[in-house]
Amino acid sequence: MKTPADVVLHNASIYTVDAGFTTAQAMAIAGERILETGNNAYILQKYAARHIINLEGAFAYPGFYDAHCHLLRYARQLGEAHLFGAPSFTEVLYRITQYHLQNPQCKAIIGRGWNQNLWQPAQMPNRQALDALFPHVPVLLTRIDLHAAVANRAALALAGIDEHTQIDGGIVEVVNGQTSGLLIDNAVHRVEIALPSPSEQEFSNQLALAQQHCFQYGLTSVADALVTPPDVRLLENLYLEQLLQLRMYAMMLATEDNMQFCFERGRSISGQLTLRTFKFFADGALGSRGAWLHHPYSDAPDTCGLQLLHEPAFTNQLARIKQHGFQAATHAIGDAANHFVLNAYAKVLPPDNNLRWRLEHAQIITPKDIELITKYRIIPSVQPTHATSDMYWVHQRLGNRIQNAYTWRRLLQASGLLAAGSDFPVEHINPLLGFYAATARKDVHGRPPDGFFAEQSLTRLEALKAMTIWAAFAAFEEHERGSLQTGKLADITVLDTDLMTAPLEQIPQAKVLLTLLGGKTVYKC
Ligand SMILES: [Zn+2]
């Protein structure tokens, strides 16, 4: 008598990513969980399944986990003008004009993804041409890193911003006594919230589409690094209606109101949507010189970036978060930001704890501060593609401090694990680009030939763990996901490529053949 199962996968190379990094050829699944893995003959003889899937020699991995991304933002962007890769501001103007023609019903033009580092000269844009083209329609165009934007006069007016406006944690640029339209950090947010947003129905459809993109790229779990209470209410409904299945670990923006909202509800932990983490921002980003540095920018000697958190307020909030059993995750890019955050964590946490507080990005960090990561068992959450996107201009910003930037090997030695994400839509959604950037430290064109500070690269094994089991650990989910073992969720990504042995330069082109979530096919190529 054979043991009943729902699905049997066989004829595959299955990387289980268990403690011994064992491989298998076949797997039996019942309901949403894994019954057993083993060799082909053993599994096929032991189990009688309704669906038997011959993977024809393909390669299976635990479902990929993006440990830091912005799914909701990505979904919103599906309804916005795409400015990614625009080689000039003229091209930006062309794209938004096209967008406006195609979406005449839009009450505002929201665009994302410009990057002045691709332009000649690499100058930040202003609102002049936007005002001429769109005198009445509000326009807000956000930089690729989301920390800077250019808005036209109509959008500034809607947000009540003029040349006298002061915004805490943000900058409204004024040139010759007038707003230039350029906004940094909280000033961007001020305009964002003033603009008309899509209807709930439109947004739900965009989220469903965003989820499909995740499955298509083999992602079965994502950590959304910024949600608010209205997002949570909408997400809960969408899970209830089963419009969403993608597993999500949501980080709540840490404001006083939001903390109240979460403390009253308590932590909510489930296989669909988990809410147990608060997200802080210690600084902005490097591209827009918002990252908070100890010493001035090498290419802008009058600024050290933006300090977005202050003491003693931050430590007080951390203490309450700890008391309520929540986790803290703090965005820290600059060396001063990382120093500030780690020292605040150190005031609240006991040494050698298992509370798994996270440092999001951990981008520029001194060896001295890295010692605190070890002592307080902080988890660095890194985005490998940031390094290979930033490497063309980061030296100008940092000078010699580049030695302390994107030091994944050092961070891994300090912490024992890294959680890897993409930060999409800041970077591309494809997690294999992260795997490639982590291991090769090159961009997709193979530059630079020897890799960017290649000594800081991860091994393939480490890179795979960072996007599976370690990402799950950083979210307290390692008992449920992150490896393919008996009793765990059958979240599986099947590729045409062996990530452990294929030439590295082939990995960005690897194809997802099949994605299973809880034993069910959610994507098939
Ligand atoms: Zn982010």
Image: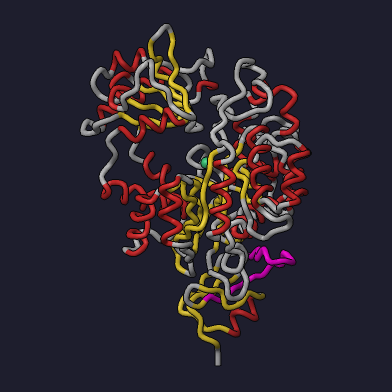
Q: How is the image coloured?
A: secondary structure
User: Residue at point 34% right, 22% down?
Assistant: 161
Q: Position of residue 264 (x, y in %)?
A: 42, 60
Residue 324 lies in the magenta stretch: no
Q: Closest to the observer: 336 or 449?
A: 336
Above or below residue 158? Residue 432 is: below
How far from the left and from the top, in percent, is residue 342?
67, 43
**Residue 49 shows in this picture:** yes
Depth check: give the residue in front, 202 or 184: 184
Residue at 56%, 42% in the rendered image: 314
Residue 236, horizontal then vertical, whole percent: 36, 59
Instruction: Give the residue at x 24% y 32%.
Output: 107
Residue range (magenta): 12-29
Q: Is residue 285 left or right of residue 442?
A: left
Q: Position of residue 145 (x, y in %)?
A: 51, 32
Q: Is residue 18 magenta?
A: yes
Using residue 1 as the reference point, say whether residue 418 is left or right of it: right
Q: Nearer the viewer, residue 257 or 451?
A: 257
- Residue in the foreground of this view, choosing between 269 and 502: 269
Which quarter shows the N terminus? bottom right
From this viewpoint, is residue 65 visible?
no
Tell how many labels.
0
Judged from this view, the residue extending furthest toward the top is 176
- 95 vs 370, left or right, is left
Look at the picture and state if 210 lies above or below 515. above
Q: Residue pushed farthest bottom? A: 1
Residue visible at 31% across and 51% down in the picture? 204
Quadrant for residue 355, please give it.
Answer: bottom right
